[in-house]
């Protein structure tokens, strides 16, 4: 099986500070991967590189065998990489339903959007997603009026209808109540297998409960990688992160 | 950057409101000119020639306001050079009107008067073709569209947005004004283009020609309104508004913001050009002062006063502010700018939704009074009372 995503010796520096240093990372299709690491380890920069927000100084990123290092954000998104931001980012002036409509997979050109109509399949897919994220009752509400946790789920829902091959999720449970965290775990678990998911998270309990493989970043490099149990007992990891 | 509350999303009520607004435009466009032409002057229903010209002028402004609201209220792009697009359309039409004077100018020359005055011997190359009405009308749309497209392409590609974008647009209109002030540029310098005689063979002095122009302008306003509303109601319109609120998210959803912004921006400029082309034959002059930065700021004020992000509000704002202006500049010439400034401050502070919000508020208060009255007379109150509109966050 060929790798879905290959990050190959990527280096990024900001004003001399190396945010990523010869970082190499490979993801297999269907994998659920957690990326952890202390502040400044380069987790968010890695997300930025993969989604095209930041260009690397050196190295390449390949997605499904294709070099995407120099593509623009929207081109990478169209190839099938979705991203969930650290802060919930939804379209506040649109209803929940419209938020999902806008991210539905399909033609994204301006002239197609002028005449676009939702097909029956698309409508049903949106309604299923509304059920999954628990917002079926709120489909007509303005997204800007939702509670924090609901916005997080809506954003995950928006990524689901986008049907990405690879889903990057940045700190999904930050600022959530225990109940909300449990629901988020369920949503993410239901994604694994069908999608390849990368989760960046600080909350170690959360990581323990969902992850199969964990990658620990430190100072822009991969410090350790493997099942949670092995990684947790790695003395270097304990020193820089878990022991702190 | 002036940030106002995002308008509520489009609902069925908005469709009816837009149909209503367009219908009113068409009706006024048909009735006023007819009353002017068909009734004798002593008839109480008679509409004076002065009023026809005024309404025609205000209607042109309203087209610009709707185009401005389309790109500012919905796409979040505050332009401070919409007056430039308007003036470019006006100049294109003005050039045509100059050319069709023929040899009836002051100097009895085939060249426009100002060229004779400057001792030019032949027509500059860029004046060719303007003797044809169709070509001039095309250029009135094409030139502003082209300027907007090229400028927008570079600005949007470099991700210039917010106040930075507004400031650059202001510089553009200022630079264009200086360019048009020069005699050597070939558009009549600071006097501009004037002394028009006919349009399509109809004398511009005739009240019937004026009435027809007024009617055409009214219909154009209705068409502009419906067009902008249709774009906003489409998925492309929702993408534009989403971009205004969360551009990065739109990008990561697979939309290219540059193409969407360029589309909205260019369409808006073309509509302004059309308004300018309708304006010039009605007022009889176009000169570089139209391109003053303050003219573009005024357009933004009309939209803000009427109610940004509603289209109907922009239209209302253009009529209200400009009617007040044409009355006050005659009655109290020195007070006008103070009134305009005060109006803008008051609206920004206490009426972020503009006059339209105030009107809607009045309507809701009346509705509430009526409902309370029914509730008192016939209890229990109807369970299906219309829910109040979503509060604006």
Image (tube, coloured by chain):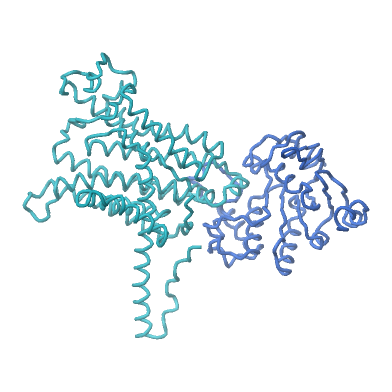
Q: Quadrant of residue B369?
A: bottom left
User: How far across and down, in percent of the image, does residue B145 sit?
Assistant: 41, 34
Q: Is residue B70 left or right of residue B104?
A: right
- Residue B44, located in which quarter of the rendered image? bottom left
Shade representing chain A? blue
In this view, which residue lies farthest toward the front?
B334
Residue at 57% over, 41% down: B256
Foreground of the two, B135 or A221: A221
**Observer-nearest of B111 and B292:** B292
* Image position of B213 (left or right of B229): left
Left of A243 or right of it: where is A77?
Answer: left
Using the image as rendered, state which of residue A204 and residue A12 is in the foreground.
Answer: A12
For the colour cyan, the matching chain is B
Q: Position of residue A165 (x, y in %)?
A: 71, 47
Compared to B314, does B111 lie above or below?
Answer: above
| In the image, residue A158 above or below residue A219 | below
Q: Residue at x 38, y 62 (%)?
A: B357
Does A159 appear above or below A181? above
Where residue A204 appears, as percent x and y from the top left, is 81, 60
């Amino acid at each position: 099986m060929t790798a879905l995503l290959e990050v190959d010796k990527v280096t990024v520096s900001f004003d001399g500070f190396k945010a990523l240093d010869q970082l190499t990372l490979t993801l297999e299709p269907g994998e659920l991967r957690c990326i952890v690491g202390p502040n400044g380890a380069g987790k968010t920069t890695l997300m930025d590189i993969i989604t095209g927000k930041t260009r690397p100084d050196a190295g390449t990123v390949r997605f499904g065998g294709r070099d995407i290092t120099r593509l623009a954000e929207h081109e990478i998104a169209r190839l099938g990489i979705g991203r969930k931001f650290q802060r919930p980012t939804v379209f506040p002036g649109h209803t929940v339903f419209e938020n999902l409509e806008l991210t539905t997979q399909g033609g994204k050109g301006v002239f197609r959007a002028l005449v676009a109509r939702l097909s029956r399949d698309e409508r049903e897919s949106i309604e299923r997603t509304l059920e999954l994220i628990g917002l079926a009752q709120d489909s007509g509400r303005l997204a800007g009026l939702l509670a924090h946790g609901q916005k997080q789920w809506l954003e995950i829902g928006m990524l689901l209808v986008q049907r990405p091959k690879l889903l990057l999720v940045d700190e999904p449970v930050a600022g959530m109540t225990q109940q909300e965290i449990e629901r988020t775990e369920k949503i993410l678990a239901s994604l694994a297998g069908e999608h390849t998911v990368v989760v960046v998270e600080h909350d170690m309990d959360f990581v323990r409960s969902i992850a199969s493989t964990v990658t620990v970043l430190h100072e822009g490099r991969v410090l350790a990688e493997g099942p949670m149990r092995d990684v947790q007992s790695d003395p270097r990891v304990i020193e820089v992160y878990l022991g702190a | 950057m002036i940030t106002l509350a995002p308008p509520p999303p489009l609902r069925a009520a908005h469709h009816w409101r837009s149909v209503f607004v367009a219908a009113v435009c068409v009706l006024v466009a048909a009735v006023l000119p007819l009353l002017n032409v068909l009734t004798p002057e002593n008839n109480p229903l008679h509409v004076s020639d002065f009023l026809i010209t005024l309404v025609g002028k205000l209607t042109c402004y309203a087209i610009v306001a709707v185009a401005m609201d389309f790109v500012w209220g919905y796409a979040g792009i505050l332009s401070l050079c919409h007056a430039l697009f308007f003036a470019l359309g006006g100049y294109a039409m003005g050039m045509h009107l100059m050319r069709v004077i023929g040899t009836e100018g002051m100097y009895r020359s085939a060249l426009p008067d100002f060229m004779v005055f400057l001792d030019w011997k032949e027509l500059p190359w860029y004046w060719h073709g303007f003797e044809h009405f169709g070509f001039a009308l095309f250029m009135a749309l094409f030139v502003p569209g082209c300027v907007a497209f090229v400028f927008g392409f570079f600005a949007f590609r470099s991700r210039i947005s917010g106040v930075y974008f507004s400031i650059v647009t202001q510089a553009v209109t200022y630079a264009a004004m200086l360019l048009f002030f020069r005699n050597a540029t070939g558009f009549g310098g600071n006097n501009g283009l004037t002394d028009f005689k006919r349009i399509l063979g109809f004398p511009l002095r005739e009240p019937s020609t004026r009435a027809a122009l007024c009617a055409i302008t009214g219909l154009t306003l209705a068409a502009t309104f419906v067009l902008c509303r249709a774009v906003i109601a489409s998925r492309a319109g929702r993408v534009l508004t989403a971009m205004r609120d969360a551009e990065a998210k739109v990008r990561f959803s697979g939309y290219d913001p540059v193409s969407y912004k360029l589309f909205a921006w260019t369409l808006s400029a073309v509509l302004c050009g059309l308004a300018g082309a309708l304006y010039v034959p009605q007022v009889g002059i176009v000169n570089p002062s139209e391109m003053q930065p303050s003219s573009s700021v005024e357009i933004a004020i009309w939209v803000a006063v009427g109610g940004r992000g509603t289209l109907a509000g922009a239209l209302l704002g253009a009529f209200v502010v400009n009617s007040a202006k044409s009355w006050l500049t005659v009655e109290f010439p020195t007070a006008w700018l103070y009134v305009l400034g005060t109006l803008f401050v008051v609206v920004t502070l206490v009426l972020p939704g503009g006059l339209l919000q105030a009107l809607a508020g009045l309507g809701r208060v009346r509705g509430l009074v009526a409902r309370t009255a029914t509730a008192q007379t016939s209890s229990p109150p109807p369970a299906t009372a219309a829910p109040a509109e979503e509060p604006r966050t």
